Image (spheres, rainbow, N blue to C red):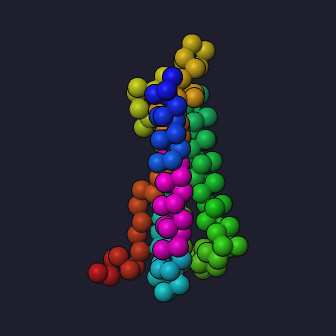
Amino acid sequence: MEYSKLKIEEFFNKDVKGGKEKFDLFFATLQSVLEAGHKVNVQFKGYASPRADYDYNLILANRRVKSIDNEIRSYKKGALNKYIKKGQLKITDVSYGESLASKDISDDILNDKLSVYSVEASKERRVEVVKISSDLIESK
């Protein structure tokens, strides 16, 4: 039991809290680049654990990306919205749902409670930045 507790604490401290800190840094850097007049396209990919059927998981993955889109739009009381409206900042969703989930994660929710609550299943429910393109990068 102690191993599981340690694994959960590590997940929240490293993945969840650490991911939030990295994302805050990403937002600040994005704002600086946009303020300098550059165009930026960001592609996000949403993932899902294999808990439900494919179509439902794809919807969940898209909702996760939409949550990030909402975070961007509410960052510093909407500081990035003017760049979105001008087309200077574009956000694209390239979600795959569960299709890229690890095959080691069980989708048997009736017989395997870890299929939903394990750290491994939790890591499958995420959003990643998969590509950033910008006139700043392309001009170098």
Question: Farthest front residue?
Answer: 2
Residue 135 against residue 125 in the figure, above or below: below
Q: Is residue 68 left or right of residue 129?
A: right
Residue 28 picture location, percent across and down:
53, 73
Question: Farthest bottom residue?
Answer: 36
Q: Which residues are magenta?
A: 15-29
Residue 45 against residue 74 in the figure, above or below: above
Q: Residue sitting at 59 percent across and 78 percent down?
A: 83
User: Where does the C terminus fall, quadrant-wise?
Assistant: bottom left
- Comparing 50 with 18, the one in front is 18
Q: Residue sitting at 50 percent across and 80 percent down?
A: 32
Q: Is residue 93 visible?
A: no
| Quarter holding residue 131 | bottom left
Residue 33 picture location, percent across and down:
47, 80
Residue 106 picture location, percent across and down:
48, 22
Question: Farthest top residue?
Answer: 111
- Comparing 55 with 79, the one in front is 79
Residue 1 against residue 71 in the figure, above or below: above
